[in-house]
Image: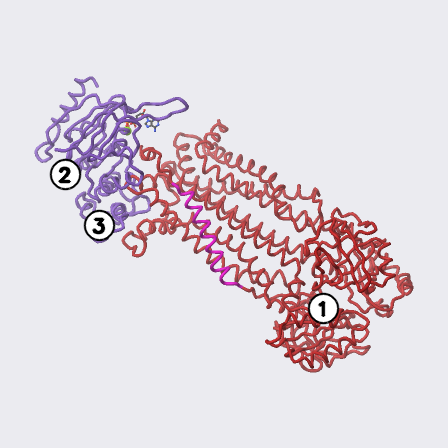
Chain colours: A purple, B red
């Protein structure tokens, strides 16, 4: 299998004030295989989100290198990065972040319609299918103020998928949801991953991490440990055992 | 703690706070400047009057003259007349006055006269409003000519008349209360008594008398005027009342000031709109914040205090800065006033009066805040915390779905639909673009109207190629006959019509007799547009100018009867029509040839003519000018141009100034508006970028929305200045005698050039402002 993302000595330094710098990422090395489902855990402030945003090219790293499908993205121009996000990456956030003045289905279609050669009919059909899959088709024409957090997060997932990305990034997408909605989201993500989309999630929740293939653990700007697991099988596994083993692993490592 | 909270707030919301602050300052600045301008005008007008002491009645006369008769008359009417003085004018034709490199003042419609300063009243002043005291060999030249011919102090001027020649050096500007304006057709050059006596001895110019009266406090102008005529005293020229001078000054100076004030008022409206705009932009955030405060248990009273204090501090600071700056800025607006009315605008009135501006703005803002706070009373803490109170309220049906878009790219469509979705915000920008267009186009329309041949309609004359004016000289009657005969036989003159203006007495609304100028002749050759009715064609018909027909004139309608004294006998005439006329104070009349001419009181003769297409009109003009030296020969456009004189020049300055102001405002406000919008939309922009839009895409969205607003703003603005402007101008000019102005609209300027220029400027502004910084880390906005 080939790697979709490859980070070497990736560092992020931010300027807090004059001559006052903060090293958030301190030379992270990380490789993510195509089709993998990776989660990142770690204490608050350890740099999980920073890792996600920098490895995806949304932010710019200050040292080291990041390759997306073998292409160095650290030095790409803004337009090229935007194109990369548009065509090859999807993002979901804890704060959902939908566009205010668009209906749910328009939010989903928007990234596809931006391309000049978009075929509206095809885009519409695809959006419908995604909304069907996430079981919110009946809300399609609603305004975003008329949906619950869980429903809106599903809209965000549909939006992230509309252009068939190679990789989906999520920064605690279930962080603000109740456990039932969170479980729903996770089963959708598992489904997506099964269909071939690579996923990288940041989470606090062992229950979420339990449903991924590999758990990375970050402390103070570095990945200090990782746990590889077998592919999660939602049909025959409620994930309880995997969750327990992750908890045990965390305790063993005194995290 | 409140001060700390206010300070924190300033710091956190720099852009929004800065914008509100700038607008407050701007509103105060403009308001104070406008008031300042008016205060200056009032004060310096009265100051000028005080120094110049203009006459209350001025009777012009040429020919036989005996001062003793006048002295006798003055003595007999002591209860009315305070002072009398006769100024003897030495009149020259423009071609006799040489300046610069062999230039002459030939072709001016103004009568040029050389005079010595009066002793008692009607003084001609220098730019410091001091009585002119001209030394031998020097001359003080009227401001009108200094501007018209671009003369400087120290330049030489030579008077040449036949053999006689005399050189002067310009030592001063002559500010002449009575004859400043281009609407008074005479201009007075002031020289030393010695030089004057020499010129008079040499019979260098034509003599004309200004018999001037300054009345006592309770003196009655009409009584003196009537008595004067009844006494049969010299009066073969026009009589001018003091109010006319005020009117003329009002026309050229106040009219300009009014335009500027109008612009200032529009600017204040803009500033007020902007303040509203910023409130709209901040209200979401403010409400959320207030919700937080409510939620953590701060009392309503304290919340209000924090919120109000913030805007109070801003309003006070902006008020003070705007007020102080206005004293510098006002100098941009009052150049004309400084020249014609007062150089020293140091009166104290303006300091007090313009305080009104910051006070009004302060009160406005505090009231608006209270209004907003009332809304806060009604919403709960939870509601306030759920964002977007303003936008969520309208639970309208979803409109403009993305798939409905057939014509635009998705990004342009997003921009256009954003305007619709948030019209509350864009509406203000829309108004501002309308006002900007209006500010620029209306003066342009006025300028084009004044410059067009159609303007003769408002001067009570029909359209002809050329006209010859014969004025008070000894040979006037003979010249007139000769001229008519010559025109009759000139094959290159297609048609011509002569008219004679003389003064008659007419019965006014109170039943007493007033003097009126009536022009008699054949008015069918060069027809004039009548407001109502038609030209006098039959015996016993008369047409009145609009000002004469109005209520405060003779109060007549078409068909009414009017009593006129002709050569001692009373005649009843019927009003056949009403026309517009802004010349001669607006009060004129026209009658058919059958009305006998008042031979003793003939004022001037006019012959209008059309030149055949083969002939060269300029050659014709030259020929008749040489043949009739005392005549004034003009083509119609030149005639209107010169009568309007520096109004046209000033108007052109105003047009340029207005366009500049319009552009500056459009740029400034577009920039501020966008910065505010961008900071308000920060998270939405970040979301769009996170799904893969480039900053260019986002720029295009804002570009599309804003330019669409601009386009509609321009259309409405141009329509408003064409139609609403027309009634505004008509209203303003109806006091001067023209009540129905039809603006001449030069389509390529109003519909093409200006819009394109404005669009280009705004486009560039958007381009610069919308440079969404692409280099910053995108995640900053996206993190929780
Ligand atoms: N742009 C920035 N400027 C200054 N400090 C920053 C910036 N971005 C992140 N940090 C700091 O870097 C550290 C790591 O931040 P990050 O958001 O990556 O942590 P995290 O692991 O995601 O934490 P959490 O679990 O709370 O989300 C934090 O201490 C944060 O305050
Ligand atoms: Mg985080």
Residue A199 sits in which quadrant?
Answer: top left
Judged from the image, the quadrant occupied by ligand 1 is: top left
Magenta stretch secondary structure, dominant: helix
Q: Is residue B706 left or right of residue A28?
A: right
- Element at badge 2? loop
Point out residue A88 in the picture as x, y percentages from the top left corner: 22, 40
Which one is in front, B615 or B683?
Answer: B615
Point out residue A166 in the picture as x, y percentages from the top left corner: 19, 39
| Residue under pointer 3 | A123
- Element at badge 1? strand
Read off the magenta span. B745-771
Tell me, for residue B632, which label it has, or none: 1
Point out residue B199 in the picture as x, y percentages from the top left corner: 84, 59
Which one is in front, B132 or B504?
Answer: B132
Whether disc 1's CB lies below 8 Å from ligand 1 is answered no
- What is the chain letter for disc 2? A
The Cα atoms of the two marked residues, 3 and 1, are separated by: 80 Å
| Residue under pointer 2 | A196
Q: Is residue B210 left or right of residue A103?
A: right
Q: Quick one: label 2, few (<14), some, or many (20+) residues within 10 Å?
A: some
**Cβ atoms at labels 3 and 1 below 8 Å apart:** no
Point out residue A168 in the picture as x, y percentages from the top left corner: 21, 37
In the rendered image, residue B770 lying in the magenta stretch gets the answer yes
Tell me, for residue A171, which label it has, or none: none
Quick check: can you spot residue B87?
A: yes
Q: Is residue A40 left or right of residue B616?
A: left
The Cα atoms of the two marked residues, 3 and 2, are separated by: 20 Å
């Amino acid at each position: 299998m080939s790697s979709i993302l490859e980070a070497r000595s990736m560092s992020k330094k931010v300027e807090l004030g004059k001559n006052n710098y903060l090293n958030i990422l301190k030379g992270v090395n990380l490789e993510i295989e195509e089709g993998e489902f990776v989660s990142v855990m770690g204490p608050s402030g350890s740099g999980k989100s920073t890792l996600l945003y920098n490895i995806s090219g949304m932010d710019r790293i200050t040292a080291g290198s990041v390759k997306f499908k073998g292409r160095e993205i650290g030095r790409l121009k803004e337009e090229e990065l935007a194109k990369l996000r548009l065509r090859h990456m999807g993002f979901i956030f804890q704060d959902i972040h939908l566009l205010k003045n668009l209906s749910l289905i328009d939010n989903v279609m928007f990234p596809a319609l931006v391309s000049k050669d978009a075929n509206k009919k095809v885009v519409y059909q695809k959006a419908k299918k995604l909304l069907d899959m996430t079981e919110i088709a009946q809300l399609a024409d609603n305004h975003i103020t008329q949906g619950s957090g869980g429903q809106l997060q599903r809209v965000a997932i549909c939006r992230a998928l509309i252009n068939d990305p190679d990789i989906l990034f999520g920064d605690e997408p279930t962080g603000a949801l109740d456990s039932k909605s969170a479980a729903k989201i996770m089963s959708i993500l598992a489904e997506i991953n099964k269909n071939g989309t690579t996923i990288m999630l940041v989470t606090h929740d062992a229950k979420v991490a339990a449903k991924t293939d590999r758990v990375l653990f970050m402390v103070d700007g570095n990945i200090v440990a990782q746990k590889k697991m077998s592919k999660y099988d939602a049909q025959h596994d409620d994930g309880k055992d995997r969750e327990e083993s992750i908890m045990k692993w965390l305790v063993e490592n005194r995290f | 703690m409140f001060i700390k909270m206010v300070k924190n707030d300033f710091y956190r919301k720099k852009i929004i706070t800065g914008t509100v602050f700038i607008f407050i300052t701007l509103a105060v600045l403009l308001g104070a400047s406008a008031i300042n301008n008016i205060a200056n005008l009032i004060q310096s007008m009265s100051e000028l009057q005080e120094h110049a002491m203009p006459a209350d009645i001025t009777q012009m006369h040429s020919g036989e003259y005996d001062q003793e008769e006048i002295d006798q008359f003055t003595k007999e009417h002591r209860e009315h007349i305070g002072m009398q003085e006769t100024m003897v004018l030495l009149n020259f034709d423009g071609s006799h006055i040489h300046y610069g490199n062999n230039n002459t003042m030939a072709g001016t419609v103004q009568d040029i006269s050389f005079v010595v300063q009066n002793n008692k009243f009607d003084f001609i002043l220098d730019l410091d409003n001091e009585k002119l005291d001209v030394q031998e060999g020097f001359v003080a030249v009227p401001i009108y000519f200094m501007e018209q011919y671009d003369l400087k102090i120290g330049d030489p001027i030579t008077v040449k008349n036949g053999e006689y020649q005399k050189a002067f050096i310009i030592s001063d500007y002559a500010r002449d209360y009575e004859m400043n304006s281009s609407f008074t057709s005479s201009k007075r050059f002031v020289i030393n008594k010695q030089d004057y006596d020499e010129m008079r001895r040499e019979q260098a110019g034509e003599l004309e008398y200004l018999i001037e009266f300054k009345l006592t406090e309770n003196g009655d102008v009409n009584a003196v005027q009537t008595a004067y005529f009844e006494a049969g005293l010299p009066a073969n020229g026009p009589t001018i009342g003091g109010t006319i001078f005020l009117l003329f000054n009002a026309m050229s100076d106040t009219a300009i000031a009014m335009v500027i004030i109008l612009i200032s008022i529009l600017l204040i409206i803009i500033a007020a709109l902007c303040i509203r705009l910023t409130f709209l932009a901040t209200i979401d955030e403010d409400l959320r914040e207030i919700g937080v405060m409510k939620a953590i248990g701060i009392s309503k009273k304290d919340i209000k205090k924090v919120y109000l204090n913030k805007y109070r501090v801003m309003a006070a600071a902006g008020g003070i800065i705007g007020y102080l700056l206005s004293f510098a800025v006002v100098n941009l607006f009052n150049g004309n006033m400084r020249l014609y009315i007062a150089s020293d605008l140091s009166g104290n009135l303006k300091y007090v009066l313009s305080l009104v501006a910051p006070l009004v703005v302060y009160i406005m803002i505090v009231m608006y805040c209270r209004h907003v706070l009332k809304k806060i009373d009604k919403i709960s803490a939870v509601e306030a915390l759920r964002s977007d109170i303003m936008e969520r309220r309208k639970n309208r049906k979803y409109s403009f779905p993305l798939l409905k878009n057939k014509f635009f790219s998705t990004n342009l469509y997003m921009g256009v639909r954003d305007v619709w979705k948030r019209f509350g915000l864009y509406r203000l920008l829309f108004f501002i673009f309308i006002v900007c267009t209006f500010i620029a186009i209306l003066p342009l329309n006025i300028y084009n109207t004044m410059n067009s041949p159609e303007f003769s309609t408002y001067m009570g004359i029909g359209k002809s190629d050329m006209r010859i004016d014969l004025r008070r000289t000894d040979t006037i009657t003979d010249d007139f006959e000769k001229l008519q005969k010559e025109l009759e036989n000139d094959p290159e003159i297609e048609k011509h019509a002569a008219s004679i203006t003389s003064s008659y007495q007419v019965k006014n609304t109170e039943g007493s007799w007033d003097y009126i100028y009536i022009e008699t002749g054949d008015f069918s050759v060069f027809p004039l547009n009548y407001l109502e009715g038609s030209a006098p064609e039959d015996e016993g018909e008369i047409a009145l100018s609009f000002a004469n027909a109005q209520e405060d004139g003779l109060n007549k309608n078409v068909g009414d009867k009017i009593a006129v004294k002709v050569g001692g006998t009373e005649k009843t005439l019927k009003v056949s029509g009403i026309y517009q006329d802004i010349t001669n104070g607006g009060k004129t009349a026209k009658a058919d040839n059958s009305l006998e001419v008042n031979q003793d009181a003939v004022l001037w003769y006019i012959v209008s003519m059309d030149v055949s297409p083969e002939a060269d009109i300029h050659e014709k003009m030259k020929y008749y000018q040489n043949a009739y030296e005392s005549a004034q020969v003009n083509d119609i456009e030149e005639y209107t141009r010169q009568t309007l004189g520096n109004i046209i020049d000033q108007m052109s300055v105003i047009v340029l100034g207005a366009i500049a102001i319009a552009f500056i405002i459009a740029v400034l406000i577009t920039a501020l508006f966008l910065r505010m919008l961008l900071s308000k939309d920060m998270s939405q922009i970040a979301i769009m970028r996170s799904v893969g839009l480039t900053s260019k895409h986002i720029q295009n969205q804002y570009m599309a929305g804003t330019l669409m607003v601009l386009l509609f703003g321009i259309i409405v603005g141009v329509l408003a200045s064409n139609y609403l402007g027309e009634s505004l101008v008509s209203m303003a000019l109806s006091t001067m005698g023209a009540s129905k102005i039809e603006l001449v609209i030069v389509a390529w300027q109003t519909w093409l050039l200006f819009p394109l220029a404005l669009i280009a400027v705004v486009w560039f502004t958007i381009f610069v402002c919308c440079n969404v910084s692409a280099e910053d880390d995108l995640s900053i906005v996206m993190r929780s």
